[in-house]
Image (cartoon, grey):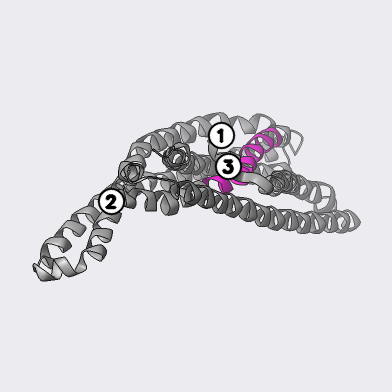
Amino acid sequence: MRKVLQQVGRYKRDAFLCIGLTALEVIMEILLPFITAMIIDEGLQASNMPVVYRYGIAMIVMAFLSLLFGAMAGKFAASASAGLSANLREAIYANIQTFSFSNIDKFSVPGLVTRMTTDITNVQMAYMMIIRTAVRSPLMLIFSFAMGFIMGGKMAFIFLFTIPVLGIGLFLVTKKTMPLFRRVFRKYDALNASVQENIRGMRVVKAYVREDYEKKKFDRAAEDVQKDFTKAERILAINNPLMQFCIYVVMIFVMSFGSYTVITSQGLDLDVGQMSSLLTYSFQILMSLMMVSMIFVMVTMSLESAERIVEVLSEEST
């Protein structure tokens, strides 16, 4: 990855701006539920409309700032990741021009094509997620967890149950899918080779009436890729029901025990505003964990692609 990241070049500035703006966006989103709780407790329940208006205007400003920071972060993330992929393609292409026939035979033409297309695209997407989502999700997780305990007190202990369950589940799903994605990239070369052989030897195939054989060979290569991708996607599909299960467990616990605490303590231990903000923070925590699992999968795919890219960049002509 170090050799790949050396190609970022003049796009480092965009990457750092993306990280900074993403952190500001997270801070705005974390403060919004806190302000909502203050509106409910100090404004609506106390029938104090000036407080509602004051905090309402503050929320509008914070929401606009969050939108602005998020849009700008997305813009710089796209610029930095696309710039990295452009520099990688340029570096690989320049190095390939120096190759002898033995160097080309070592990688094969389909293998070089895959590296300059699919592999670089994977690295580009992973880099975008690293400087955007991989910054946003951990910050959101940490801040939401802290604010959940500040606002909910003992009620926030439900997170100590749901976070390990979701975390272990996502870890097992990611661990199962990693080998499958690695296997898929090796099969892309065979798929590209089949296409290239047919294009280059089209006259020979027609002259010897080998169309049916070539179609079957391509079908086998395509089915190999399809089977591994299907198996990986089926395992990844477990993420959604697991996420929904954890969300509804938290909702049931917070709304049932939270309502009981509000009524029995007369709002001293927990009030309505704190309970509503606790629900929001629980969603943010669980969604952050979900995004972290997606980052692991994407980074795993990109590591295999990065190794293949570095092989070409490090190759010296014979």
Q: Secondary structure at mark 3?
A: helix
**Label 2 crowd (10 A; few <14 / some 14-19 / many >=20):** many
Relative placement, left or right, of 278 versus 49 is: left
**Marks 1 and 3: in contact by CB < 8 Å?**
no
Whichever of labels 2 and 3 marks the residue nearer the N terminus, that label is: 2
* Closer-to-camera residue (59/227): 227
Q: Secondary structure at mark 2?
A: helix
Q: Secondary structure at mark 1?
A: helix
Whichever of labels 3 and 1 marks the residue nearer the N terminus, that label is: 1
How far apart are the alpha carbons under marks 3 and 1? 27 Å
Q: Residue at x 14, y 60 (%)?
A: 216
Which amino acid lies under the numbered mark 1 shown in the image of this protein? Arg
How far apart are the alpha carbons under marks 2 and 3? 30 Å
Image disc number at residue 288: 3
Residue 144: within the magenta? Answer: yes
**Label 3 crowd (10 A; few <14 / some 14-19 / many >=20):** many
User: What percent of the width, then of the height, locates residue 46?
Assistant: 85, 50
- Which residue bears the numbered disc 1? 2
Relative placement, left or right, of 313 versus 281 is: left
The residue most toward the left is 208
Identify whether 119 is placed above or below 266: below
Relative placement, left or right, of 161 versus 22 is: left
Q: Quadrant of the C terminus?
A: top left
User: What percent of the width, then of the height, locates residue 72?
Assistant: 71, 56
Which mark lies nearer to you, 3 or 1?
Answer: 1
Image: magenta residue range? 126-147
- Which residue bears the numbered disc 2? 225
Which secondary structure type mostly characterizes the magenta part of the structure?
helix
